[in-house]
Image: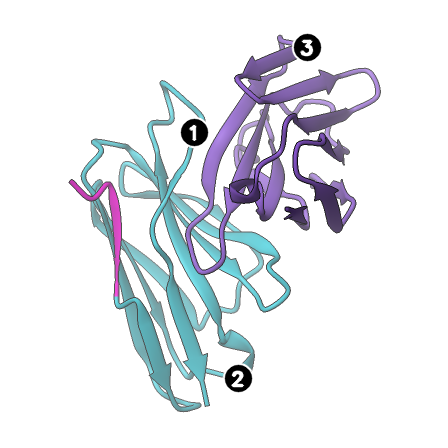
Amino acid sequence: DTAVSQTPKYLVTQMGNDKSIKCEQNLGHDTMYWYKQDSKKFLKIMFSYNNKELIINETVPNRFSPKSPDKAHLNLHINSLELGDSAVYFCASSKRAVSYEQYFGPGTRLTVT
Amino acid sequence: GENVEQHPSTLSVQEGDSAVIKCTYSDSASNYFPWYKQELGKRPQLIIDIRSNVGEKKDQRIAVTLNKTAKHFSLHITETQPEDSAVYFCAARGANFGNEKLTFGTGTRLTIIP
């Protein structure tokens, strides 16, 4: 009965590689988000999709490209990984019209070496 | 854009005592203020939230107060227990179109001393 799930949980890769993180929610929510949490625990929004449409795009390098194939999925693809991309990436979802509450996934710890 | 400041960054409290964490926000149009608890290695989880039309909300040992005029809100935990040890984040949600996102504070590491 997992609400928001992410894969993989851990990702270790070398600089310059391209990687993807997947997120799925089974809550029937219409809005999904990607957050980045750095080593100092700062939690910052990167993107938000509502009904597969991009509605929030923070100042994020264009090496990061989100894709939402349907309302229940939001993936994050990262090109040409850099050391500074190392962080924990959290996916979240909410039912925008009903509640502002956001449910977070378990996180993906990305380590770039 | 919205700016949320959170204090203190660390807080140690004797078990059974109360803990208070304070946040201020900059966008007077913000309309929703959640508090998240994040245990080590885990996801942030909502523990309580308040909307801008309410001044106070309580849920057992946890309460949140909101002062819209001063643009600050606080988390109060009473009768603290060891399992309350975690990092707590406040957040504010913008209400204007295109700004409907949560901006988080920088977190407070709360340690309950047995």
Q: Quadrant of residue A9?
A: bottom left
**In the foreground, B4 or B56:** B56
Q: Measured along the vertical axis of the image, is residue A86 above or below residue A38? A: below
Whether tag 3 and tag 1 are in contact, CB under 8 A, the answer is no
Q: Chain of mark 3?
A: B
**Span highlighted in magenta in the image:** A1-7
Q: Which mark is residue A76?
A: none
Given the image, on which type of amino acid does mark 2 rest? Leu
Please provide percent x and percent y for residue A29: 27, 32
Q: Which residue is mark 1?
A: A101
Q: Which residue is mark 3?
A: B55
Q: Chain of mark 2?
A: A
Q: Which residue is mark 2?
A: A83
Please provide percent x and percent y for residue A68: 26, 51
Please provide percent x and percent y for residue A56: 48, 45
Q: CA distance from mark 3 to mark 1?
A: 18 Å
Question: Position of B99 compared to A18: left or right?
Answer: right
Given the image, on which type of amino acid does mark 3 rest? Gly
